[in-house]
Image (cartoon, rainbow, N blue to C red):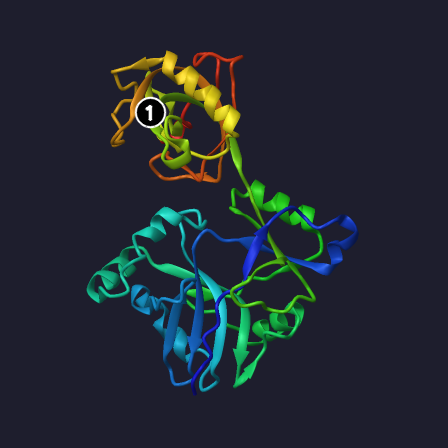
């Protein structure tokens, strides 16, 4: 049969629901992977589509056997493709080596042998010829669990009803990306960023030393568009990323004046990062940033600026790379 194309429903950033409404919500682990809608035609075939609607089935050959998991029952499922590290946690950097290979089957097969993926399923949108998107989340979840979709490269993790504070605390204690809160009575809204789903990303905070900046464009012409930051390791300043968000206009103007006073022709980072057009500064400014996680090379992912720390010198700050990153 011909299955309907369904755009994935999206979550809105926010906070935990009020304690008085906690029992009306389910809580799922926020995964750090690639969102997919899975189409099982009931003839043994499977089609994966990314959030953009692009077909990406060829990038993940190890997921092809999922096509036969429901026999002749057609279905449309919602989920996320993950690459897991040695501790069993989602690692987006690992997954990036698998993405973009949908039209390179030989390369995709080689990478699948080296970095296998795992598909987590968390919703069913269409089943046995019937649309389920108008059913409440709780009922769709029950239907999904009844399908018993557990296999070598896919699974259906459980969702916790109520106990949101405990669920969020557990994600932080285990170093997971965050939590998704889903209202039990919510319908599925294709392509909509809905308040019925709330995502909470666990962010970490650390001190960094500013070693350079990149010029802004457009309305930011003449101001820093991003600062280049580092942390100490083995007596040198190691580059850990660029930070371009988190400032007000006044803060960005203040920062521009400070950077101008510290201008130098010498790059303070070792090794020198690839940063065309960078302006270097003496590494004397300390700032505090928030970020989601680190890459294996120690780079900050999704960093944003919190504040300058004029009360700290680089020597007094905690701007050091973790021991396992040195």
Q: Is residue 107 above or below residue 18?
A: below
Residue lying at 36% horizontally and 66% vertically, measured from the top left: 54
Q: Residue at x 29, y 52 (%)?
A: 97
Quick one: 291 or 65, which is closer to the camera? 291
Left or right side of 3 for 167: right
Which residue shows up at 48% across the image and 16% down it?
A: 317
**Which residue is drawn at the image coordinates 46% and 51% (left, top)?**
32
Displayed quadrant of residue 226: top left
Q: Position of residue 39 (x, y in %)?
A: 43, 75
Q: Nearer the viewer, residue 156 or 197?
A: 197
Tell me the element at label 1. Answer: strand
Q: Is residue 326 visible?
A: no
**Does 231 sit above or below residue 276?**
above
The residue that label 1 is drawn on is: 238
Image location (x, y in percent) of residue 225: 39, 31
Query: Relative to 42, is 251 on the left or the right?
Result: right
Quadrant for the N terminus in the image: bottom left
* Residue 154 horizontal/vertical position (percent): 44, 66
Q: How many marks?
A: 1
Q: Quadrant of residue 258?
A: top left
Q: Quadrant of the C terminus?
A: top left
Q: Residue furthest left?
A: 106
Asked if residue 280 can be seen in this view, the reply is: yes
User: Which one is nearer the viewer's eye here, 168 or 259?
Assistant: 259
Question: Taking 76 as reference, is 228 above or below it?
Answer: above
Could you tell me residue 310's position as x and y percent? 51, 14
């Amino acid at each position: 049969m011909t299955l309907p194309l369904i755009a994935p429903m999206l979550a809105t950033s926010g906070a935990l629901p009020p304690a008085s409404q906690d029992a009306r919500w389910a809580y799922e682990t926020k995964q750090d992977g690639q969102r997919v809608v899975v189409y099982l035609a009931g003839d043994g075939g499977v089609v994966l589509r990314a959030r953009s609607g692009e077909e990406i089935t060829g990038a993940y050959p190890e997921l092809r056997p999922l096509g036969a998991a429901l026999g002749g029952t057609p279905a449309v499922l919602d989920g996320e493709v993950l690459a897991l590290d040695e501790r069993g946690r989602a690692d987006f950097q690992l997954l990036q080596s698998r993405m973009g290979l949908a039209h390179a089957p030989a390369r995709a097969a080689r990478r699948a042998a080296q970095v296998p993926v795992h598909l987590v399923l968390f919703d069913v949108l269409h089943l046995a010829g019937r649309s389920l998107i108008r059913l409440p989340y709780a009922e769709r979840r029950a239907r999904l669990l009844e399908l018993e979709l557990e296999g070598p490269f896919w699974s259906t993790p459980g969702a916790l009803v109520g106990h949101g504070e405990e669920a969020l605390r557990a994600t932080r204690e285990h170093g997971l990306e965050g939590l998704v809160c889903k209202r039990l009575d919510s319908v599925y809204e294709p392509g909509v960023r809905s308040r019925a789903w709330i995502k909470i990303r666990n962010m970490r905070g650390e001190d960094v030393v500013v070693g350079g900046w990149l010029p802004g464009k457009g309305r930011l012409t003449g101001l820093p568009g991003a600062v280049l930051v580092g942390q100490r390791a083995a007596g040198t300043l190691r580059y850990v990323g660029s930070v371009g968000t988190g400032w007000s206009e006044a803060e960005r103007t203040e920062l521009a004046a400070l950077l101008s006073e510290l201008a130098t022709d010498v790059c303070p980072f070792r090794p020198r990062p690839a940063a065309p057009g960078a302006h270097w500064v003496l590494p004397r400014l300390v700032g505090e940033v928030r970020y989601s996680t680190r890459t294996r090379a120690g780079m900050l992912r999704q960093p944003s600026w919190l504040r300058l720390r004029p009360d700290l010198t680089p020597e007094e700050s905690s701007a050091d790379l973790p021991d396992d990153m040195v």
